[in-house]
Every structure is written in C-alpha cells, then in structure tokens.
Image: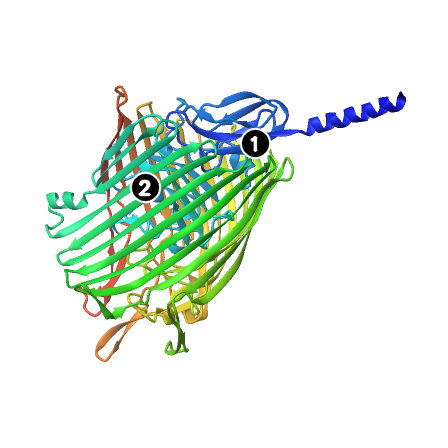
Amino acid sequence: MIRRAIALAIISLLSCHVYAQEKFTLSGKIADSLTGEDLMGAIVYREGTTTGSVSNSYGFYSLTLPRGNHKVKFSYLGYKTIIKEIALKRDIILNIDLEPSNTNLGAIIVSPERRDLNIKSVEMGVERINIKQLETIPVLFGEKDILKTIQLLPGISAASEGSSGFTVRGGSIDQNLILLDEAPVYSASHLMGFFSVFNSDALKNISVYKGGIPAQYGGRASSVLDITMKDGNNQNFTVSGGLGLISSRLTIEGPIIKDKMSFIVSGRRSYADLVGKLSGLIKEEMTLYFYDLNLKLNYRFNNNNRFYLSGYFGKDDFGFGVLGMGWGNSTTTLRWNHLFSKRLFSNTTFLYSNYNYGFNIGSDARMSSGIVDLSIKQDFTWYKNPENTLRFGFCSTHHTFNPGKLLTGNKINSEIILEQKQGVESAAYFSDNQKISGNLSIEYGLRISMFNQLGSGWSNVYDNNNTKVDSTYYNKGEIMKTYVALEPRVSLNLNTSATSSLKVSYNRMAQYLHLLSNSTSGQPTDTWIPCSSNIKPTMASQYSLGYFRNFSDNKYELSVECYYKDMRNITDYEDGTDIMLNENIEANILPGKGRSYGAEFYVKRRLGRFNGWLSYTLARTENKIEGINSNDWYPSKTDKAHNFSIVASYQITKQLSVSSSWVYYTGNAVTFPSGKYEYDRQVWAYYTERNGYRMPDYHRLDLNIHMNGKEKNRFKSSWDFSIYNLYNRHNAYIINFRESEATPGTTEAVRLSLFGIVPSITWNFTF
C-alpha cells in the first residue's frame, strides 16, 4: 500500500509538472479596421509582464504562452488598444482589427510603435516613419517627399539643395539600398533630382537603417531605405488625390472581394512644362515633365496563404529643340506569404527592376544605358519562443549592365558601344533576436554573400600607365571573377533603468556594384558597373554606441549615437577622367580606403498638440586613395562637419495646424583652382588639394499651414500653404570662376543659386 501511494504521488507530481510546462501559441494578423491594411510594428504582450511580440511587415504576430488564462494587450500608436481575455488550451489563431483613435496626436509623429520601444528594442540607428503623420512637413513646391523628410533626421544629409539624393553617415549616394516592395530602385529622382519617385499617397511604411543593419539586408555599404506600398482598402472603395502648382495625383483603392482581395492604383503627373509655357518661362519647343504609376493587388487565399502583386512605373522626359533626354524606373514584385505552422512564417519573392536612360539628337543619334535585375528571395521567420525570434533565408539576383551604346538612325554605331556586362549576386543569412534576461537583449547574425562576374566579355589587364597590355575573352555564362564576403552583424541592448538603455552594434557590409558619377547629388546620367578583376567590392565595417532615454511618461525621447565606419576599396577617378562612353574606364578608377566617424544627437517630442524634433550631427568623412592628393587623407565629397535641423508642428485647432523646419549644414567639400598659369599663350587653372575648399554654409527656413475643410458625408478636403526658404536665403549651388570684366586679368568667383523664396499651394481630397 505504501509503495503504491508513493508511486501514485510521483506520477501525480510528474503529470502536474508536465501540465505546468505545457505551452501553446497565439498567432494571427493585426490590421486597420477601416482599411484592412496590415499594421507593421504592432505590440502584442501579456498584461503585467514583459513577455510579448511585435507584428512583422505583413502584420503577422506569434506569441507562445503557458497553458491557462491570460490577458493579452494589442496596441499600436494612433489606434485604440484592445485587451483580450484568452483561455489558452490549444493553439489559437486570432486576427485583430484595431480602430484608429480619435485622439489628436499632432501632425508629426515619427516611429509608429509602442512609446518605449526605442528603449526596449535591440535596434539602433533605425527610424520608422509613418507616412500619414508626416504630410504637413514643408518641402519644395509643396510636394510631399519622403526622401526630403528623412534628410531632416540625424546622420542623413541632403546631397545638394533641392535634391532627393541623400547621404548617410558619410557614405556616397550609391551606398544606399533603396527598396520599394523589396525591389531595388536605382534612380529615385524626378526632374534632375528635385523630386523623388515615391508618391506618398501609395506608401504605407518606411524604415531607414543607418547602423545595426539586420542580416536580411545586403548589397550596399552605407544604409537601407525599405519602403512598403499600401495593400489597398479591402473594406470600402475610396478615391483620394491632390492638385498642386507643379503636379497632381490621384489614388483609387478598394475591395474586389471584401476581406479577401483588394487593389490600389495611384498615379501622379507633373505639368511644369504646361505652367512654364502659359507663364512664358518655357518656350514652345521645350518638354519638361514626369509621371509615375503605382499598382498593387493582394489576395488572401486562406489563413495560411496570401499573394501580393505590385509594380511601379515612372518616367521623366526633358527636351529642348532637337535635344532630348529621358529616364525611368520599372519594378515588379510577386510575393507569397505562407504559414508552415503557428510559429514559422515564410515569404517568397520574385523581383524585376529596370532602370534606363537615354539622350537623343533629333532622330539622328541616341545614346542609352541602364541596368536590369531579376531576383528570387526566400525569407523565413521562426518565432521559437517569446525570448527568441530567428530569421533566415537566401536570395539571388542576376544583373545585366548596359554601360552605354550609341545609335545612329536606326542602327547601332559599332564604334561607340560599350560591352554589356553580366553578374550574379547571391547571399544566405541567419539572425536571432534573443532576450537573455529582463535587462539584456541581443541580436546576432551572419550574412554570406557572393558575386560572380559572368561572360560573355573581355577581361582586361592594364599597366601603371593605364595602357591595356592583355585581354582574355570569356564566353556567355562563363565565370570571369568571383568574390565572397562574410558579413557578421551583432547588436546588444542593456536596459540601465525603466526609462533608459545603452546599445552597441557592429555590422559589416559588402557592395558589389559601383556608380560612375562626377556629381555629388546623383544624376540620371550616372552609370552602374559591376565588380571585376580590376574593381574590388567595397567593404564597410561600422561600430556604433548609443545611449537612449525617455522622459515624462515617454513623451520626450533623447538619444546620442556615436559611430566609426571603416571603408575599404572605395573608388575615385584620376584627374580629368571622362566617364561617359569610356570603354577603358576601369583603368581610370583608383581604389582606396575611407573613414567616417561622428556623433548624432536627437531630441524628440512625440505626443501632444506641439511636437517635433531637434537633431544635430557632428561628423567627419575622409578618403585616402593612392594617386590623389599626394596619397594623403582628404575630405570626401560627402564630408559635412555640422548638420543641424529643427522640425516643429503645432495643432492650433482640429482644422488648423502650422509646421516649420529649419536646416543648417556645412558646405560641401569641393576642388577649386588655387591659382592659374600661362602656357602656350593660354591660361590654365592650377589645382592643389583634392576637395581642399568648401562651398558656403547652407541654411534655410520652411513653413507650412495645413487647413482641414468641413467633412460632408464621406468627402474630406484640406489645403496646404507652404513657403520654401522663407527668409529668401540665396544658397550657393555652383561656384564658377571667370575673368573679371571690371578688372581684366583677374579672376572672380560667380555664385549660382537655384531657389529664392518659393510659395506653393496644394488642395487635397478624399471620398
């Protein structure tokens, strides 16, 4: 009897232990109740604990909890929080629709997640931007432009005035990976850089990675700008748009099958040429316009499968008489989301990207260039437990480079055609976001990348005088050169208190593509080329340290981030190099190394009628390339010691708000002549240091007034009155040198400014 009782007691204790350890998974999608749009970054956590999860880019979440009754909170900034009482006795699929809050959050809010996520998360050097809440920031010509908005953040700087080109922590413009629904965009500008190709009405989420870049991203040495298009309203048909001084836009979205299938079509077209002709500023024979079109279709087959098909098509056309120039981007993305289990999420993607540009002289001659990508990606997310989220996958991209060719009439001029180049860029990665203890979290991973330059084509060998001394021909598909790189990533977060944390990160990035450009801001005439036997991949290693602190119940955020970036195999050109239609350009490209270091200070008020941010960056960026500047370190074109911006918004009433921004930064480093000399009866400029001079410092104040009209049934409207460069500062865009007319024999500098004060007005509507 005693033995039986002891055995029964042991069995009972073991069964209770097993029962106590039994766990189940709560998973599903989180979406906007009015539009059905997936909400990325929504917080799901067990009330009274720190156990939780964050929804991914497709709104999917997964949370594993012990068997029993739990109160689970679902929250997203700008939406009403929902608390569900859940009896967890088995795996449960629970889709949540969050209702937008009527609480006035103000006009400008950066980062749509939970208020203290900047303290709790491992991420650093990352900003997430909510498009809806950035509409009132004043920009050039009143055009909402996300690329100009991110230039107001610390560590990110405008390449030049009015340009959508940007540099991040001293990197060049080609070191930024720009993705639209995962497809790469190689030229993100309209009208020679004054507008971006991204129509804000078609966009949903934007993430900017400056440091601590996750392992799933690669291919560029500096930053990642990941942009996601809207999926389309699956509840109601809506029409929205706007009329501005330079362009108009229209967006139509709605359900095809309610709750299952929806679409969005968004278009924009400029009419600067029409306005110019009517005002007499543009002659009749001039053409100047751009358009872009965003399309997306998504279909929820069942709870485990969802399909997305999206595309972007844009073009610029500029012509004067018989001279013409055009360029454009086309991208297509096909994605399949699949749930293998409640914890394993899969995303399979097929991508197409095409960037091309061309010049023409009437019908007599035309030059064209471009790059075409075909890609496949496979990404997995495994929610192993609340303390571990693993991501792993692979990708492969086939690049086709067209460096340039000249057509005469309808025939290709065989004397002026650059050899087409091929390459395959592949990578595999894994990462683990792990919570080690209540105060310590880590995300670590590894990306292994490889680039194969493929034939057909010639591989040339040059001597020290840039003379071709040998050539080897490779047939189509043959491997001409292979590069392999290991790219480790690690980020660590130590919560020093409930309102502060200390973070460190390290990431290594490899870039196998190079941009041939003589400009700082980037122009459509720039040409992409691959790595080869003569051009090695750029390698960048970045170390970051940051302190983050919140005040007044997370209403205010403060952060200080310091970084050091070491770059290898960066490129520059020999003096006097002509990059256009140069078949031996590799001989003129000089490799070297670079370094960039600095500190970023950021103060942000997130909530309330008055909000905004203040950012200041103190930084240096230098290059050292053999054959330039006597082999000494010299400032990079992107070197700016000081970069300061203030963004502020005040909600005066429910219908009226005012916002403004002020920017100041050190002038770009440039190479000016140090003197002149006479040779063979001609006057020549004499140059000493590379980038040894500075453009004048830049500063500007912008203002925007936003007025909401009265809502009638479903029709809503608003007006935006903007003033760019309010105090009419004439910032230098170019400085040229010429002989003085007043004092012959002397040289004078002539400053060219693009913009003075520029007012604009835009009418927006939706119904």
* Residue 202 in picture, x, y percent from top left: 32, 37
In this rendering, does residue 51 appear at all? no
What's under tag 1, amino acid-wise?
A: Leu
Judging by the rendered image, the residue that carries numbered circle 1 is 63
* Circle 2 residues within 10 Å: few <14, some 14–19, many ≥20: many
Residue occupying the point 49% across, 45% down: 379
Question: Disc 2 or 1, which lies upstream in sequence?
Answer: 1
* Residue 249 in picture, x, y percent from top left: 25, 37
On the rendered image, what quadrant is the N terminus found in?
Answer: top right
**Residues under labels 2 and 1: Cα distance?**
37 Å
Q: Nearer the viewer, residue 579 or 356?
A: 356
Badge 2 vs badge 1, beta-carbon distance below 8 Å: no
Q: Nearer the viewer, residue 320 or 312?
A: 312
Q: Is residue 435 left or right of residue 653?
A: right
What's under tag 2, amino acid-wise?
A: Asp
Residue occupying the point 45% across, 65% down: 536
* Circle 1 residues within 10 Å: few <14, some 14–19, many ≥20: many
* Residue 236 in picture, x, y percent from top left: 32, 25
SS for callout 1? strand
Residue occupying the point 31% across, 53% down: 355
Judging by the rendered image, the residue that carries numbered circle 2 is 145
On the rendered image, what quadrant is the C terminus found in?
Answer: top left
Q: Nearer the viewer, residue 114 or 760?
A: 114
Q: Nearer the viewer, residue 766 or 275?
A: 766
* Residue 284 in picture, x, y percent from top left: 10, 50
Q: Is residue 264 left or right of residue 406?
A: right
